[in-house]
Image (cartoon, rainbow, N blue to C red):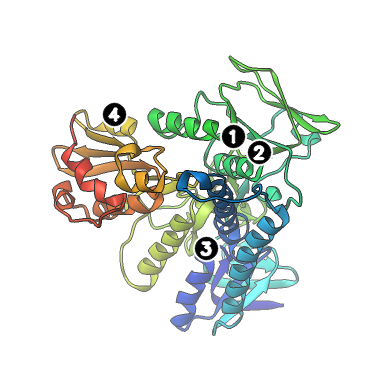
Amino acid sequence: MSQTFDAIVVGAGQAGPAFAGRLTKTGMKVALIERHLVGGTCVNTGCMPTKALVASAYAAHLARRAADFGVRIDGSIGIDFAAVMARAHGVTLNARTSNERWLESMNGLTFMRGHARFEGPHRLRVGAETLEAAKIFLNVGGRAAVPDMPGVADVPYLTNTGILALEALPEHLIVVGGSYVGLEFAQMYRRFGSRVTVIEQGSRLIGREDEDVSTAIREIVEAEGITVRTDTTCIRLETRPQGVAVGVDCKQGEPLVAGSHVLLAVGRRPNTDDLGLETAGVKTDARGYIEVDDGLATNVEGVWALGDCNGRGAFTHTAWNDYEIVAANLLDNEHRKVSDRLPGYALYIDPPLGRVGLTEAQARERFPNVLVSKRPMTRVGRAVEKGETQGFMKLLADPVTQRLLGAAILGTGGDEAIHGILDMMNAERPYTVLEWAVPIHPTVSELIPTLIRDLQS
């Protein structure tokens, strides 16, 4: 059976459904194909379930600190792991069900379940059906990368997907990868009661950040009892009667770490290897990411790639912005570009790290007279009042243009406070404008004008 559409969207992640909604509102006949779970990584195995778990872990942590706030809790603090996981799964299920109902009720949309493969530049096969369209939008997402390290095929390892299916709390969780995903799971499971060891091949945690950020984050997680092993030049996995073992060649520490579970958190890879892209002539890079131009178009006319599969962003908000860019250019006669996007993101340990723009190291390479301002959270009233004074705030600026270049807020509310700086950078206004803002007291954001006044080379 063959069907013809005005447009086909492959993948119901963050960008796909919203884009299908825009297209159908113009009167187009649209097909949206999803082979697994509606909502993609964010709804099913990423943001929503993990941040629900982070919230449960924070509640447990705060309960243990109750006495610090003059609150007496009679009896021990316990974790009902089944209830914790049920809550996270409920958050996911509610979001996914809502999205499914939206798609199924969308006028002009044919919502199909199945695996789509190209049979030509504008022809796809889904099961026994053939679909054709002049416009095809790929939103197929990504998955956890599994490195070809010794022993990986012999060990029952976890990824960010598998760890969400656990029914019992790990006795000792070994996390291979000391970056964003790995650190979030490490801290939450430590707060649930597991022993946790983080193994990082590099010389420090989250190596893309400035060294002071990495150092502070290591201090935060180690203070909670997480063991951190860095400079692990050769990582190998072995089975054990009671679980697994990870062999490491480190400058310090034992050469073997034994645990009950191992989580591989060493990066992501795109879901592009089984789409038949070569049949359509769509180019990919050496890592499998679909190559796109500044408007997210592939080398094949009429085919676009949005979200994690294009390698131009690894976040829910960048996938959403991909949809906004393509929709604006295609439907609103605008000229939006990915290169105009300002990089911002967060690390959701507690306290969180909010980041935007350049790191200090990057800024010093490009701007020899860069201005820097830094303030510890111990001097932020809101943090003191909440009893959460770990971390610091850092701001970077160019003295010539008076433009903000980047910022890092590692501390309570950092994931929210960073938006004051992000918004000013997006507006491309001089930092003097923000210097004379009158922020609300008491907040973390109220220190931003103070940081600006303290900028110095």
Rendering quarter of residue 121: bottom right
User: Could you tell whether 291 is left or right of 392 in the image?
Assistant: right
As drawn, which residue projects farthest toward the top?
A: 251
> What is the distance, in whole Å, between disc 4 and disc 1 at their CAs?
27 Å
Marks 2/1 in contact by CB < 8 Å: the verdict is yes
> What is the distance, in whole Å, between disc 4 and disc 2 at their CAs?
33 Å
Image x and y of residue 325, in percent = 38, 62
Work out whether mark 2 precedes mark 3 in sequence or the reverse, and give the earlier one.
Answer: 3
User: Could you tell whether 423 is left or right of 325 in the image?
Assistant: left
Q: How crowded is mark 4: few (under 14 residues within 10 Å), some or many (20 or more)?
A: few
Q: In this view, does 5 lie above or below 372?
A: below
Query: In the image, what residue type sits under mark 2?
Result: Leu
User: Could you tell whether 28 is left or right of 97 in the image?
Assistant: left
Secondary structure category for the residue under label 3? loop
Secondary structure category for the residue under label 1? loop
| Residue that label 3 marks | 14
Image x and y of residue 21, in percent = 49, 76
> What is the distance, in whole Å, between disc 3 and disc 4 at their CAs?
35 Å
| Residue that label 4 marks | 365
Work out whether mark 4 precedes mark 2 in sequence or the reverse, and give the earlier one.
Answer: 2
Q: In this view, does 76 lie above or below 82?
A: above
Secondary structure category for the residue under label 4? helix
Image x and y of residue 296, in percent = 43, 57
Query: In the image, what residue type sits under mark 4?
Result: Glu
> Which residue is more in the foreground, 96 or 151?
96
> Which residue is more in the foreground, 15 or 291?
15
Query: In the image, what residue type sits under mark 1?
Result: Gly
Q: Residues within 10 Å of mark 1 (few under 14, many from 20)?
A: many
> What is the distance, in whole Å, between disc 3 and disc 1 at their CAs?
26 Å
| Residue that label 2 marks | 264
| Residue that label 1 marks | 177
